[in-house]
Image: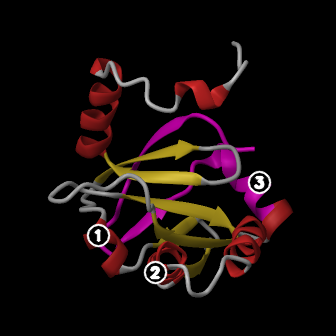
Amino acid sequence: MFRGISAINLDVKGRLAIPTRYREELLENFDGQLVVTVAVNERCVGEPGCLWLYPLAEWERLEQTISKLPTLNKMAGKLRRFLIGNATECEMDAQGRLLLPEKLREFAQMDKKLILVGQLNKFEIWNDAAWNAKEQDWLDSDDNEGLDELGSLSF
């Protein structure tokens, strides 16, 4: 399970280093095999998006779920084209680095400073400035949309 926030850097070749606290689990449980794709729910027109980074086994479970969606449903088709069409397999090197494809770096407007956010079964990768702006938006928001869907969740 992946949790927490880590500030990381993107090098000039487009690689990021996975924080050491996650490397052992990714190597032992997933052989360092990962899939990176665009996040489908965090981009507004003109704003940077974020990327999702899945261990390959988790990604394959998601693909199985998506493959069962109706092929004639427009939204399912968009999801397949966008999420799976942009998915790229990547492998951690000996130093725990991953090469992010240029197209995905451009989509998320990534520069040197990044934020890696653990999301239990995957990571989100954000441009540092975009993460800080979104975090402030979330803190300032009065939006309770979907709150009732959480039911009796308590903390």
Q: Position of residue 100 (x, y in %)?
A: 43, 73
Q: Amino acid at mark 3?
A: Glu
Q: Residue at x 77, y 54 (%)?
A: 24
Q: Secondary structure at mark 1?
A: helix
Q: Which region of the structure is painted magenta? A: 1-27
Q: Residue at x 51, y 32 (%)?
A: 146
- Distance from the alpha carbon under mark 2 to that under mark 3: 27 Å
> Are there few (<14), some (14-19), or many (20+) residues within 10 Å of tag 2?
some
- Distance from the alpha carbon under mark 1 to that under mark 2: 10 Å
Q: Amino acid at mark 2?
A: Asn
Residue pointed to by mark 1: 107
Q: Secondary structure at mark 3?
A: helix
Q: Is residue 78 magenta?
A: no
Q: Please tell me whether mark 2 or mark 3 is closer to you in this view.
A: 2
Residue 86's mark?
2
> Are there few (<14), some (14-19), or many (20+) residues within 10 Å of tag 3?
some
Q: Earlier in the sequence, mark 1 or mark 2?
A: 2
Residue pointed to by mark 3: 24
Q: Classify 45 as above or below 32.
A: above
Q: Amino acid at mark 1?
A: Phe
Q: Nearer the viewer, residue 88 or 96?
A: 88
Q: Earlier in the sequence, mark 2 or mark 3?
A: 3
